[in-house]
Amino acid sequence: MMKKIFTIFLALTMAVSLFAGCGKKNAAENGETDSDKLKIVTTIFPEYDWVKEILGDKAENTDLTMLLDNGVDLHSYQPTADDIVKISDCDLFVHVGGESDGWVESVLKNAANKNVKVINLLEMLGDSVKTEETVEGMQETEHAHDHSKEVSTFEDDEVQDRSLSDWAGDWQSAYPFVLDGTLDDAFAAMAEKGEMTAEEYKTYYQNGYKTDITNIDIEGDHIEFTYEDGKKVGSDYQYVGYYIQNWSTGTKAAMYRFEAVDRTSGAPVYIEFNDHMIEPAAAEHFHIRMSNESFDAIVDPENSWPTFFPADMTGEEICEHMEGHDHDEDEDHEHEEGEEHEHEEEKDEHVWLSLKNAEVLVNAISKSLQELDPDNKDTYATNAAAYIEKLSALDGEYQAAVDAATYKTVLFGDRFPFRYLVDDYGLSYYAAFVGCSAETEASFETVSFLAKKVDELKLPCVLTIEGAQHKIAETIVQNTAEKNQKVLTMDSMQSTTSKDVANGTTYLSVMEKNLSVLKEALG
């Protein structure tokens, strides 16, 4: 799927490169001085702040840009046309360099400035870069996706009741991605091993996925439906049991049925979920069918199966998910027992959360600036040295805090981007998900395991990362014996905005606050 993205960017970059080149020429002809400024583009906040510190008072004569300036997460960011123009014409480009930056190669290849200096954080750190790690109790993610519980053949007495919480979260319809061509690569992959052409698969899925519902939000016992015209309707629902659906292929599925409590709300009265599982488990996607008359009135379930994926998944990620599944013409997703999709080990991109890494990277940025602007190299060297002293001093404070701590383990009811930090100081950790996970809902097994770990280790706190939703951490606390642990937040700087910068937020100030939280968590 990245090939498609690269193609788009290639065409866009070629166009904007011409524009950027013309713009620079016109500025020079008009006697403008902006074209003489050192142009620096960074992707994320830590890079931006490090550059600012090195520049010092020379920042006034520099055009410095932070691309992710509105709270967009690194893992979901894609550059705009304006972003590409800035990169194309800059003198220094600083980026993380992991899987999230898969778009960078194409943009740089077509940059107007062929002499742009590039700092790739992961490349700069070399062998010290870690791969994502799955520790005991951590929920499997899309990077280690196990479909062994998805079944198409089973004995009826194997089916277990499930609660609406299995489908909790924000979900989006896959139907628009069929219409706009985003899923075409998946249909092409199906055609290579199936009995239909890619176009026939597309038509089949277009009919099967068809729905006028764009989003479904499930929280507690409440379901809210959003329609194409923006209309929202919702109701509480009660579970009424399951129905065994026998398909014409000889396979079958468990349909979990719910009825609307408020039949005047406008929300569908009778709904049933199918996610290819027959026992309690957090859904990774689901098919939903509905009627306002009765369950028996649900129309043609073999050929109509509106399908919903997590709302934070991109169309390309959904396409990759579909390419990894085996689909046949009757909506039968067959998997061998214990089958797993293999993925290359993904690098842990959150290198900036190590103060030790920060020292290395600040030094590298300083050297690049000295080469680009030799007239001010002494200033950059002096500023970098002073800043590295501050980083080193804070690093020492972290080590002292850990040495004096009662506990040597942290537990996150959230994603875990702090592996570099805990490894620096010899701490152990447990977490709900890996750092790059897109998951938002934890399974009962994950919550139960983490709650038992809190009890076992007598931890005073459950940690989260920045963001408004801390439901998992709160649920973990409620499942402990004491139910009195604090929920504290550490900031991974993945959502820092330009407004935060204007209000005085710096890399050091965030890391100092994280130290305060860590001290409380470690006792």
Image (tube, rainbow, N blue to C red):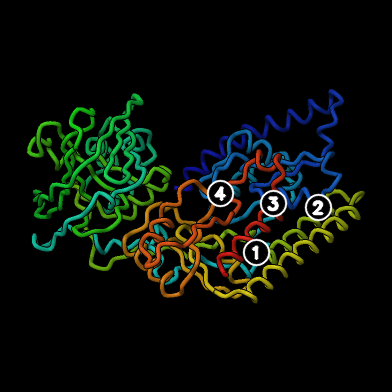
Which residue is the site of mark 4?
A: 74
Label 4, residues with CA under 10 Å away: few <14, some 14-19, many ≥20: many
Precedes in sequence: disc 3 or disc 1: 3
Q: Whole-Å distance between the Cαs marked 3 and 1?
A: 13 Å
451 and 496: which one is in front? Answer: 451
299 and 57: which one is in front? Answer: 57
Q: Hey, which quadrant is residue 184 in on the image?
A: top left
Which residue is the site of mark 2?
A: 54
Is label 4 in contact with label 3 (beta carbons under 8 Å)?
Answer: no
Q: Position of residue 291 (x, y in %)?
A: 15, 34
Label 2, residues with CA under 10 Å away: few <14, some 14-19, many ≥20: many
Which residue is the site of mark 1?
A: 354
Q: Whole-Å distance between the Cαs marked 2 and 3?
A: 11 Å
Numbered disc in front, either 4 or 1: 1
What element does badge 3 sit on?
helix
Q: Is residue 97 left or right of residue 160?
A: right
Precedes in sequence: disc 1 or disc 2: 2
At 30% across and 55% down in the image, what residue appears? 282
Which residue is the site of mark 3?
A: 47
